[in-house]
Image: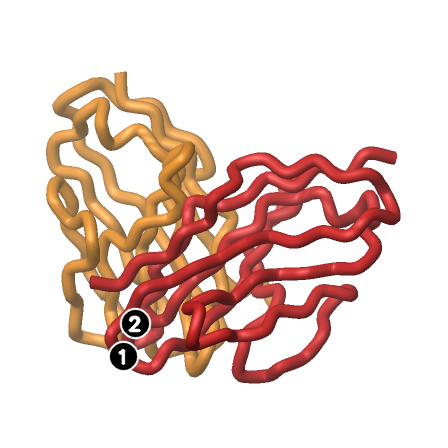
Amino acid sequence: NAGVTQTPKFQVLKTGQSMTLQCAQDMNHNSMYWYRQDPGMGLRLIYYSASEGTTDKGEVPNGYNVSRLNKREFSLRLESAAPSQTSVYFCASSEGTYLHFGNGTRLTVT
Amino acid sequence: AQRVTQPEKLLSVFKGAPVELKCNYSYSGSPELFWYVQYSRQRLQLLLRHISRESIKGFTADLNKGETSFHLKKPFAQEEDSAMYYCALDYGNNRLAFGKGNQVVVIP
């Protein structure tokens, strides 16, 4: 049982480049989330999807877009990467009272 | 708006000593609180939640609504407790507001 799987694990981008972070869960959860983790800031919610076909903004959505492709997959897209988006990105899913997290994607924007 | 505060960034304790990680929150609704832990090279995982009122790995946490606190405690620290600990508040639809985290280092 893989749980929540994120790809890639590491990525380096140049300013202005675009990329999509992939996330998939095999637990049949309805809700999925994208967080970013920055030193001294904890985790902050970027976007979430309460169910297939719906997405909503979190605390820090600017510069990001998301797609809930189906119940399993929830992708995060950076259209024009900026150095301020250098971070570790975590995907999570839930069905009930707590979140299951992926291993994270470490993104560096130069 | 919801807010979670964890005042200490780094906490170093000797093995066998008590550990207490402080967490305070502000939230206008009925609070649901959690502690998550991230061990080295592992994913973030749930440690405990106030609703279940259970002890996990010797850790306990009591929700004090009067003091708006949810401090995490363990009477005798072990080396395997070295990790990053996050207090989190559910503010609806399982959206979590996290504190900034505490790095715990247990000295042998």
The answer to whether residue B43 is visible is no
Residue visible at 36% across and 40% down?
A41
Image quadrant in which you'd find residue A28: bottom left
Image quadrant in which you'd find residue B36: bottom right
Q: Residues within 10 Å of mark 1 (few under 14, many from 20)?
A: few
The answer to whether residue A87 is visible is yes
- Left or right? Give the position of B61 relative to A76: right
Relative to A66, residue A14 above or below: above
- Give coordinates of residue A67: x percent, y percent: 19, 59
- Give coordinates of residue A106: x percent, y percent: 42, 34
What residue would you read off at disc 1?
B29
Q: Nearer the viewer, residue A96 or B13?
A: B13
Q: Identify the subunit bearing mark 1.
A: B
Q: Secondary structure at mark 1?
A: loop
Q: Identify the subunit bearing mark 2.
A: B
Quadrant in the picture for the C terminus of chain A:
top left
Which kind of residue does numbered mark 2 sit on?
Tyr
Image quadrant in which you'd find residue B26: bottom left
Letter of the orange chain = A
Q: Any mark on residue B91, and which?
A: 2
Instruction: Give the spatial CA distance, label 2 vs label 1.
Output: 8 Å
Q: Nearer the viewer, residue A88 or B8?
A: B8
Quadrant in the picture for the N terminus of chain A:
bottom right
Relative to B104, residue A48 above or below: below
Letter of the red chain = B
- Give coordinates of residue A39: x percent, y percent: 41, 32
Q: Any mark on residue B15, and which?
A: none
Q: How many marks?
A: 2
Q: Secondary structure at mark 2?
A: loop
- Give coordinates of residue A20: x percent, y percent: 25, 43
